Every structure is written in C-alpha cells, then in structure tokens.
Image (cartoon, rainbow, N blue to C red):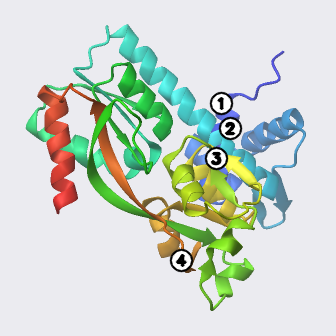
Amino acid sequence: MSDLPDLESLRLLVDVERLGSLGQAARAGGIAQPSASKRIMLLERRLGLPLLERTPRGSTLTPQGVMIAAWASQVLAAAEELMRGARAVRHGREAHLRIAASMTVAEYLLPRWLGELQSREPQVQVGLDVQNSAEVARLVGAGIELGFVEGPSVPQGLASRVVATDRLVVVVAPGHPWARRRTALLAAELAATALVVRERGSGTRETLDRALAGHEVAAPRLELGSNAAVKGAAGEGAAPAVLSGYAVEGELATGRLIEVATKGIDLERRLRAIWRRGRTPTGPAATLLRISLATARE
C-alpha cells in the first residue's frame, strides 16, 4: 500500500481551508460530513499530523493543517497539469501556439490577454506551461516561441520587451507585531528576519535577493513553490512574506494580510515577454505579444 495520500482527500483538505469548515467542504465535494471526517482522519494517520481542530462549534484546520493544505494545492495543480498534458498528447499536440509563463503573470495577467487573443483569432489553440521564471527562460531557449517572466534579468540569447510593472510588498498576518508598527521597515531589518519566501529560480525570489544584496540575510523560515502557499503560511502567522502586489491584492482588501511599509528597499520590477534572439514571434505569438504590449501602454 502506498504511503501517498489520495487526491480526493487532499482536495477535501484544501476545501476546508478555502471554505472555512469541514461541513461546507463536504457539501462542496458532494459527500456526507461523517464520510468527510473519516477521510480527514485517515489523512491525519497517513501524514502523522493533526490537521483538524474539532470543537462543538465545528472543525477548522490546525496550523499544521493550513501548511499541508497549501502544499496540497500544489499537488492538485500538478495533477491537473498532468491531465491537461495527457489530453494534449492524446489529441495529437494540436495546440497552434505554445507559450510559457511565470506564476504571477499566468495567474493575474495572462487570462485577460488570452481572452483577447481568442476574440481576435478564435481558431487558435493555446498550450500553456506555468513555471518559475528560470524554467520559463529555459523552455523558451529550448524552442517554445514566447514566454513571460517576472525576474529582474533576462538570460543571454533571449530578447525581451516589458509588458507590465509590478511591486513586491511585505505582508504579515493581522496578529503579527509588524501589522501595528508605525515606522517603515528598513532593508537591514527585513534581511535579518526569517521570511516565508518563494523558491530559488522564481522572479519574486530573485527580485527580493537583489533588493537585500549587501546585507546579511537570515535563512528563510519556509521556502515554498507557489504564491498561494506563501500567502497561506504568512496568513497563519508563520512569518512575514514578500510577494507580488498582484498576488496579495485580494488578501489586502479583505484584511487577511496586512502590508508593511518599507523604506530604502527597491522592490519594483518589470514583467517581460521573452523569445529567442533572432527569432521574432510570428503568427498567433506575435498577436499575443502585441496584446500584452498594448496592456503595458494603458
């Protein structure tokens, strides 16, 4: 018997975090609450961690459960990507345009651009790889016609155009001491703090590392592979985090995360379209590039 948890149990755990209770998660999954409770108990035994805090008023995630739910979201996303890839192979690689994009661009900018592309060229089928910026650059170098990255630099051999600007923000849970501070955070203090950060190779991490260059940087409290996981950890009070302003817009609006003002830290960055030097995009790729550049001029 495999030690790996089943995907439906992971999805149930993610729904508890998303919806706020086991009962609502069970209804969303179309199962009875006792069955949902048994699934979570089996998952707890398999992982060796308490995931739910059970009270007379209902069940909510423990701090460990919140962290596991964040990682479970990545597992589910990877499984969905596997199925999309399998469908693409099964259909004979029918995509007319293959692109790659970093997570921030893919989550917050590409949907609008692809919608506009579909309205202009409805016959085009798009295949999208969502990776961190370093991997997007590698894919473009290996032959994908167009990519979108968020790092402050572009590898040799690639051409680029700026399609949007972004600013990283320092965020904390409402109960964190920094949420009530009245003075701006300086680079030395941020560098000395163990943070929840994105993995190396992501544009977000590269921008943060450059902003803190010259300071002695503390080891990360957690190093996670998605914006959602970082937000989840920061929201539960694990540690402060530094993320794209696009990524935390909703959490700041609802008060789930609090932005901490900074001073003397360059957290601005440019988001870029990239392609192989000497191979200017043509056809649908050129149309998508024009759409993204038009957004940058708005």
* Residue receiving disc 4: 264
The residues bearing labels 3 and 2 have C-alpha atoms spaced at a distance of 6 Å
> Foreground: 258 or 80?
258
Badge 3 element: helix
The residues bearing labels 4 and 2 have C-alpha atoms spaced at a distance of 42 Å
* Residue receiving disc 3: 14
The residues bearing labels 2 and 1 have C-alpha atoms spaced at a distance of 5 Å
- Amino acid type at circle 2 is Leu
Which numbered disc, 4 or 2, marks the residue that appears first in the sequence? Answer: 2
Rate crowding at label 2 as few (under 14), some (14 to 19) or many (20 or more) other CA atoms within 10 Å: many
Mark 4 against mark 3, which lies toward the viewer? 4
Which numbered disc, 1 or 3, marks the residue that appears first in the sequence? Answer: 1
The residues bearing labels 1 and 3 have C-alpha atoms spaced at a distance of 10 Å
Badge 1 element: helix
Q: Are marks 4 and 3 in contact (CB under 8 Å)?
A: no
Q: Are marks 2 and 1 in contact (CB under 8 Å)?
A: yes
Quarter location, residue 196: bottom right
- Amino acid type at circle 3 is Val
At horizontal 56% and vertical 40% (from top left) the residue drawn is 201
Q: Are marks 3 and 2 in contact (CB under 8 Å)?
A: yes
At horizontal 83% and vertical 23% (from top left) the residue drawn is 3
Residue 132 falls left or right of residue 172: left
The residues bearing labels 4 and 3 have C-alpha atoms spaced at a distance of 38 Å
The numbered disc on residue 7 is 1
Q: Are marks 1 and 3 in contact (CB under 8 Å)?
A: no
- The quarter of the image holding the C terminus is bottom left
- Amino acid type at circle 1 is Leu
Residue 12, horizontal then vertical, whole percent: 66, 42
